[in-house]
Amino acid sequence: MKNWLKENWFKVSLLVILIVFGYFFAYSEQIKPANAREDCSKTAGKDIKDLLDDDSINSEETVLLYNFRYNTCLNSKGVQR
């Protein structure tokens, strides 16, 4: 095993670097945006929940306000819709 590692140290280190790079790429492209979307959905939903009890606002305005707050939250977290 020691001889194999001495002969292939460059390949092993390159493989480790690729795995680490792959993890950070997956995090930045998949995991982070998914978490941000979930958090923003909850935040916008909490903000709108109080408005649903109010009779002075209709459902169309509620949807527009939800979308505005959701998109604003996503933009603040650096995620594009």
Image (tube, rainbow, N blue to C red):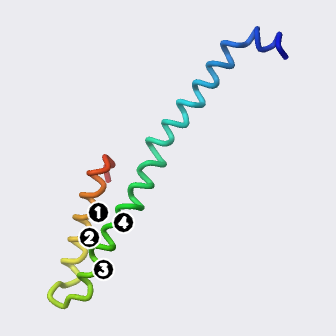
Residue drawn at 51 percent across, 41 percent down: 26
Q: CA distance from mark 1 to mark 3?
A: 13 Å
Residue drawn at 73 percent across, 12 percent down: 8
Q: Is residue 45 left or right of residue 23?
A: left
**Percent position (x, y) of residue 7?**
76, 8
Asked whether the residues under the numbered discs 1 and 4 touch, taking CB atoms below 8 Å apart as contact, a structural biologist would say yes
> Is label 4 in a helix, a strand or a loop?
helix
Q: Is residue 4 left or right of residue 33?
A: right
Q: CA distance from mark 2 to mark 3?
A: 10 Å
Tell me the residue that label 2 is attached to: 66
Is 52 above or below relative to 26?
Answer: below
Q: Is residue 29 left or right of residue 60?
A: right
**Percent position (x, y) of residue 64?**
21, 71
Q: CA distance from mark 1 to mark 4?
A: 6 Å
Specify the label residue 41 is tagged with.
Answer: 4
Tell me the residue that label 3 is attached to: 49
Q: How many marks?
A: 4
On the image, which quarter does residue 1 sit in?
top right
Asked whether the residues under the numbered discs 1 and 2 touch, taking CB atoms below 8 Å apart as contact, a structural biologist would say yes
Tell me the mark number nearer the camera, choosing from 2 and 3.
3
Tell me the residue that label 1 is attached to: 70
Q: Earlier in the sequence, mark 4 or mark 2?
A: 4
> Is label 3 in a helix, a strand or a loop?
helix
